[in-house]
Image: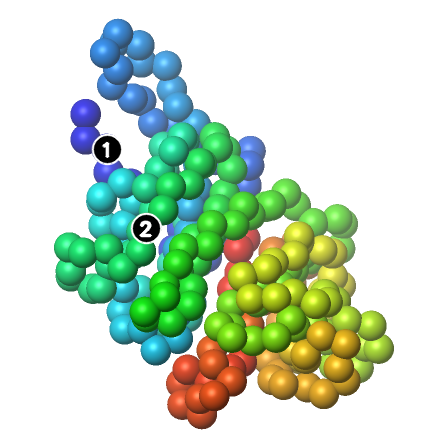
Amino acid sequence: MKTHLKNFSLTTKIALSLLAITTIFSACKKDWNNDPIEAAGIGFVHASPGTAALDFVLDNQKIGSFTYTNDRGYYAAYPGNRVIGVAKKDSLRYLTSGTGTLKQGVFYSAFVVDTLKSTKILLVEDDLKAPDADKAKVRFINLSPGSTALDLAVEGNATALFTAKAFKEFTPFASINPSESYTFQVKEAGSATVKATLPAIKIEKGKIYTIWAKGLSSKTDSTKFGLAVMTNK
């Protein structure tokens, strides 16, 4: 039976919690066993600087088109081994693909990373358990091709939030106090020199965020080195 993926919540960027992801798919099986299957959740993020719009593909089915730094929330997917890939928009040829194992009730982010000639898929498990009371959660991912290891800090704080993350490395989610206006800073590991900032970012109680280093240090256009943020939940 052909199954179409369902978008969980794109416009609000609110991911369903592990309890709320009880959206159930009935699978047609050879033995006619109609036991429900709990979905996994997968989101797609275009993080390949200098690469035009891409089609994300799951098991040879197009999910949607994405431009650089664009994410569109989570989609439902059957658990198990899935083929995850990207193609140039409206093309039938993969730029890159790989197999990821999706677990029931678990959320993932699939980042397309590196430059056009070297694109890869980085599949990261997303811990969407609620933050501690009166807290938010944040993590950091270094998706800047060719960068040195990086630290992520908050302006005015002497201690970095996360340290020494090389390209494609990521941290667990960590608790952070809410704020109406944080300025995040990215620095070379162990350095006090700020390479880029992400100013005036509102971090809300109960929400979960990913901050990622993007772009190329050698560029000054829209693909230049910097920081981006997305709301996982």
Residue at point 76%, 50% (across, down): 133
List the single residue furthest toward the bottom: 220
Residue at point 61%, 58% (across, down): 170
Q: Write down the quadrant of residue 58 in the picture.
A: top left
Disc 2 element:
strand
Q: Which residue is mark 2?
A: 97
Residue at point 69%, 57% (across, down): 136
Residue 204 vs residue 231: left or right? right
Please tell me which of labels 2 and 1 falls first in the chain: 1
Q: Nearer the viewer, mark 2 or mark 1?
A: 2
Q: Which residue is mark 1?
A: 3
Residue at point 51%, 85% (across, down): 217
Q: Write down the quadrant of residue 198 in the picture.
A: bottom right
Quarter of the image with the N terminus is top left
Tell me residue 79's x, y (percent). Answer: 41, 31
C-alpha gap between disc 2 and disc 1:
21 Å
Task: Kindly identify the amino acid type of the residue bearing the numbered disc 2.
Answer: Ser
Task: Kindly identify the amino acid type of the residue bearing the numbered disc 1.
Answer: Thr
Q: Which of the colour schemes (rainbow, by chain, secondary structure, one colour) is used?
A: rainbow
Tell me residue 105's x, y (percent). Answer: 50, 33
List the single residue furthest toward the right: 158
Q: Which mark is residue 94?
A: none
Tell me residue 118's x, y (percent). Answer: 36, 66
Dot 2: within a 10 Å radius of its alpha carbon, few (fewer than 14), some, or many (20 or more) residues? Answer: some
Residue 122 in sight: yes
Q: Are marks 2 and 1 in contact (CB under 8 Å)?
A: no
